Image (spheres, rainbow, N blue to C red):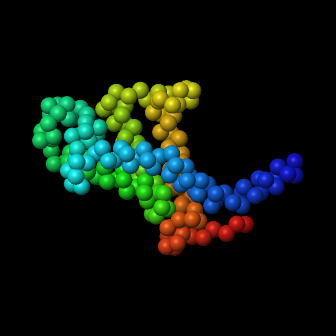
Amino acid sequence: MILHLRAIAILDRHGDWLLPSLARLVFGGVLLAYFLASALTKFDGPFTPSVGAYAQIFPKAFEAAGYDPSGLSFWHDLVVLAGGYAEILLPILIVLGLLTRLAALGMMGFVLVQSLTDVHGHGADAGAWFDRASDALILDQRGLWLVLLAILLCKGAGPLSADRYLGVEPVRLAA
C-alpha cells in the first residue's frame, strides 16, 4: 500500500509537465503526418485551392455546382484556403509547443468541423460512443483526439516547448 501511495504522490507532482509533454509527443507521432498529408491535398499552389479540396470541404455545394470550382463563391475559396492553412499551421504549432493552448483550441474546432463534414457532407457513419468499433467510426476516434487536445488546452505545452522558452507558459515547480 505504501508503494502505491508513493507512486501516486510522484504522479501528482509530475503530472503538470508529464501529461502535456506526452500529449504533444503522441500528437506528433500519431496525427501530425495525417493532418499535413490531408492539408497538402487542398492546394494546387500557395493561393490556389485544389479541386479535391472543394470536394472534401463542400461536397454537396461542389456537386450542386457541377463539380466546377468556378460555380462556387469567393467565400468557398476563402474557407478552403483557411482550412488548408489551419491544417498545416495548427499541428506544427502544437508539436513545437508554440501558442499551444490557442493551437489546441483551434484544432478542437477543426476536428469538430471535420467530423461534421464527414458525417453530414460525406455520409460517414458517426457510430456510437463506446461501441467497440472505434477504428472505423468517428465518435470514438475523434473523441480520443479531442481528449488529447483538451490536455494541451488545460495544461499547456509542458517544459520542453517554445511556449516555456518564450515565457508564454509559467514554470510550474513540483510540490
Count of numbered labels shown in the rendering = 0
Measuring from the top left, give residue 114's x and y in whole percent: 37, 40
Q: Is residue 113 above or below residue 88?
A: above
| Quadrant, the C terminus | bottom right
Which residue appears farthest toward the right when viewing the image? 2
Residue drawn at 52 percent across, 72 percent down = 165
Of the pair 30 and 61, the residue shown nearer to us: 30
Residue drawn at 16 percent across, 48 percent down = 74
Visible in this render: residue 60? yes
Residue drawn at 50 percent across, 36 percent down = 141
Measuring from the top left, give residue 138's x and y in whole percent: 45, 33
- Horizontal arrangement in the rendering, residue 96 relative to residue 2 (left or right): left
- Horizontal arrangement in the rendering, residue 150 relative to residue 82 (left or right): right
Measuring from the top left, give residue 21's x and y in whole percent: 58, 57
Q: Is residue 75 above or below residue 100?
A: above
Of the pair 83 and 95, the residue shown nearer to us: 95
Measuring from the top left, give residue 157's x and y in whole percent: 54, 61
Visible in this render: residue 109? no
Residue drawn at 87 percent across, 48 percent down = 1
- Horizontal arrangement in the rendering, residue 62 relative to residue 172 (left or right): left
